[in-house]
Image (cartoon, helix red, strand yellow):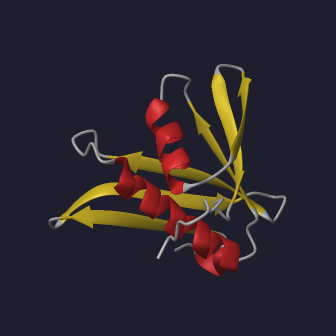
Amino acid sequence: MSDAGNGMVLAAMVDGRIVAMGGWDRLPEGDRAEIDLTVDDGHDDDSVGAALLRGLAAAASQMGIRRFLNRSLPDDGRVRRILARAGFETSTVYQEGVLRTTFSTVPETPRGFSYR
């Protein structure tokens, strides 16, 4: 974790090896942060990335972060699948060759579903 609640990095392990890493850094707006997520190409299950993303969002929310920004290339469909699997409702804009996706740090909870 970085100093004074301005960022965080988490890793997810499966069978003793790191399969995903993610982190966020607070933006100057104060209640927003840029988030990055990397999942090992050899690990096909998006649920690990989704769980990691929900953990990062929960911690960020407790530190006053209300919205995340993720920048990805248009051909990176995996990050969009992970966001959807994690339950986040996103807004995406294509700008200068990059997809800028923003979303609340509180995921949408489908009826009858629990993240516990």
Percent x, y of residue 111: 61, 63
Residue 11 x/y as whole percent = 37, 64
* Residue occupying the point 68% across, 48% down: 89
Does 62 sit above or below residue 90?
Answer: below
**Image quadrant of residue 106?**
bottom right
Residue occupying the point 41% across, 54% down: 49
> Residue most toward the top?
97
Q: How many marks?
A: 0
Image quadrant in which you'd find residue 44: top left
Q: Viewer-proximal residue, 6 or 66? A: 66
Residue extending furthest toward the front: 112
Return the x and y of residue 59 as percentages of the image width and height. 59, 75
* Residue 81 drawn at (x, y percent): 48, 40
Vertical order, 27 against 46 (above or below): below
Q: Is residue 27 left or right of residue 15?
A: right
> Please, which residue is most extreme toward the left here?
15
Residue 10 or residue 3, whichever sits in front: 10
In depth, the one of 8 and 99 nearer the eye is 99
Name the residue: 47% across, 50% down: 37
For residue 37, above or below residue 15:
above
Classify residue 103 as left or right of residue 30: left
Q: Is residue 108 left or right of residue 66?
A: left
Indicate left or right for 16 with 84 as reference: left
